Amino acid sequence: MWCHARMVYLPMGYLYGNRYVHNKAEEDPLIADLRRELYPQYKDYSAIPWMMTCHWIAETDNYSPIPWVMKTVQNILARYEEWSIFQPFKKHVRKMGVDFSLEYMDAEDLQTNYIDIGPVNKV
């Protein structure tokens, strides 16, 4: 079964897995506008306390509140990401995941004759 969500997530997951960083983000006026719009309470984007913001949800978007168990697990996994003791294991697992994603995207391209749901897949 072909899944639209998977076709959008795979390239984004690939970029995240490789920790892609837009090297001219500080100079890009569009990114600066987005940062000001999304985080108006912060004048300096680099000063945002990301660990404190990970569970922020606008009331209008909170259709199904996140259970405390999920928040706890997310907090534990966020701390796990920071611990250097797990670095060799994380590096190996991340490489396996990124390689699998790339193979999957290549196979999807071949199977669909490079017909996609839009430009999102090729970003």
Image (cartoon, rainbow, N blue to C red):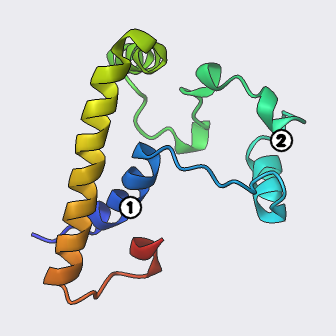
Give residue 83's mark. Answer: none
Snapshot quadrant of residue 28: bottom right
Please name the residue shown 13% across and 82% down the image.
111
Q: Residue furthest right?
A: 43
Amino acid identity at mark 2 = Pro
Residue 5 lies left or right of residue 75; in this view the side is left
Q: CA distance from mark 2 to mark 1?
A: 29 Å
Where residue 85 appears, as percent x and y from the top left, is 38, 9
Please name the residue shown 61% across and 49% down the image.
21
- Answer with mark 2 or mark 1, whichever residue precedes in sequence: 1
Q: Nearer the viewer, residue 22 or 12?
A: 22
Q: Is residue 12 above or below residue 115?
A: above
Where residue 7 appears, as percent x and y from the top left, is 30, 67
Please name the residue shown 38% across and 61% down the image.
11
Disc 1: which residue: 11
Q: Residue furthest left?
A: 1
Q: Quadrant of the N terminus?
A: bottom left
Where residue 55 appears, as percent x and y from the top left, is 54, 26
Disc 2: which residue: 40
Q: Secondary structure at mark 1?
A: helix
Residue neighbourhood size for the residue with mark 1, other residues' Cα within 10 Å, grouped as few (<14), some (14–19), many (≥20): some
Snapshot quadrant of residue 47: top right
Q: Nearer the viewer, mark 2 or mark 1?
A: 1
Q: Nearer the viewer, residue 71 or 100?
A: 100
Q: Nearer the viewer, residue 55 or 122?
A: 122
Please name the residue shown 69% across and 54% down the image.
23
Q: Is residue 46 above or below residue 14?
A: above
Q: Secondary structure at mark 2?
A: loop
Amino acid identity at mark 1 = Pro
Where residue 6 appears, as percent x and y from the top left, is 27, 61
Residue 96 lies left or right of residue 75; in this view the side is left
